[in-house]
Amino acid sequence: MRRTSVRAHDSASTLRRVLCCVLVNCALLLVACSPPADPGHPTAVSSAIPKYEGEIFRYEKILELRPDPDNFDETFLYEPRSFTLGDDGLFYVADTGNHRIAVFDGEGELVHAFGREGQGPGELQRPSSVRVRDGIATVRGRRKIRFRTDGTFIDLITHDGDGEVDLADDGTRVVIDLPQGPQDDGFYYLQARARVLDEDGGVVATIETDQVAKDRMMPDPAMAREELHYGAWPHVSLLPGNEILATPGDRPVLEWYGLDGVLKRRARIELPFEPITDQDRAAVEDRYDRLIERNMEFGASESLRDELLGMKASAQYPERKGFWWLVEAEEPGGWIWLTVPVPHFGIYYRGVPSIAQQQFFRIVSPEGEYIGTTEWPPEVDRFATHVTRGHLLAMVADAEAGETIPTVYRITPAVEGFDYPGGR
């Protein structure tokens, strides 16, 4: 009995030593596999519970930029795509079909217009967006051109290579693109990338999001921006203040970088993953049916109907929803508006307004705090909107007139104690 007891004691001691070694080795392995500590740029973790519950904004329609019947030819906007509010209090509209920028005052009266069709200095080709800051209008179309707000041509912003070039506040050129390529399993991946250029066009810093696989997107990486969204979409934005915001979209993480490519801060919101349901798929199919119906009402061809039916039949669905798929930073204040994925169409066929579901947004502070959610008016389509200086600027479809009307909403807080810097 004594020998047996000694052997049992020895076995127990050996087992304890083995377990101790295993635990130590596991701890060392976890340390080795963990990302290095970054004490200078800690990750701010924000609760999934918003700071303000419920709808945090109200939207009051204050202006529609409609043609003046007494001056119809001059004031008619032909396929306008977007507009903005300048720091001079004027509204600048990308009048795409007229190849110009039309400028309106706060009463909706046309003040002046600049640009004309062509490829020379100061000439435009179907401008799709305009942004105004510090007295300079930056117009995006087939080329990116800068004007003074009186219409005087400044320069053409160019870049040799892939991607779209933008200018930081200090004039630094930043090229943003979405490189993609095949994976070993045959799927495609996509990531957003920003490259900061020096005066000679050399790359001095590169900022990239994590790669997002095709099976987490919808439906196809090459078409996802024009199509419908439930999955993830990586995004990089050049923000006011010479910062670059990056997010993969399939993880609730936001990262802010300087123009030197150095990470300045990181935020993670503890949001749960949501699966794609049969109700979600039915909503997508309904969007297709409504888009087909609308196009046929506007005289679209049978071949177009067949094309849309084919797109509907071949739509691919990820297993789970992404956390957001478009990012916009408001100026001023640095508030981040994150589009919650819903079935959404951003397609224009023959000028026919697209179909959209009412859009939801998560609002995040510049420090990464989850402020709350907002739901825009049901007539507002996300792909042609802009938030600036306490206003929502939206392209609203007038189905009866068959036109798209630039419409201005004033944004005001809907909850007590909510300090909204954009409304100042």
Image (cartoon, rainbow, N blue to C red):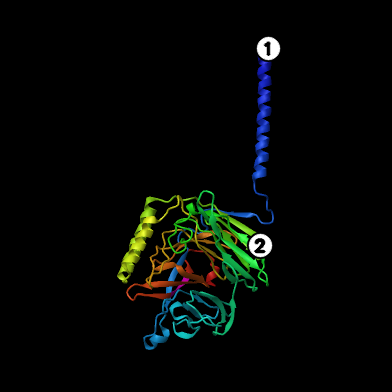
Residue named by callout 2? 261
Who's the residue at 38% across and 69% down the image? 349
Who's the residue at 48% across and 74% down the image? 128
Report the span colored magenta: 407-411
> Neighbour class for label 2 at 10 Å: few (<14), some, many (≥20)?
some
Residue named by callout 1? 2
**Residue 246 numbered mark, or none:** none
User: Was residue 114 drawn as part of the magenta stretch in this picture?
Assistant: no
Q: Quadrant of the N terminus?
A: top right
Q: Is residue 310 left or right of residue 6?
A: left
Q: Quadrant of the C terminus?
A: bottom right
Q: Position of residue 223 (x, y in %)?
A: 46, 61
Q: Position of residue 44 (x, y in %)?
A: 61, 55
Q: CA distance from mark 1 to mark 2?
A: 70 Å
Task: Work out whether residue 222 or residue 334 is closer to the camera in this orientation and state it.
Answer: 222
Q: Is residue 108 visible?
A: yes
Q: Position of residue 103 (x, y in %)?
A: 48, 82
Q: Are marks 1 and 2 in contact (CB under 8 Å)?
A: no
- Which quadrant of the structure image shows residue 308? bottom left
User: Was residue 408 drawn as part of the magenta stretch in this picture?
Assistant: yes
Helix, strand or loop at mark 1: helix
Who's the residue at 42% across and 84% down the image? 75
Q: Is residue 413 left or right of residue 302?
A: right
> Neighbour class for label 1 at 10 Å: few (<14), some, many (≥20)?
few
Q: Residue furthest bottom?
A: 70
Question: What predominant SS class does the magenta segment belong to?
Answer: strand
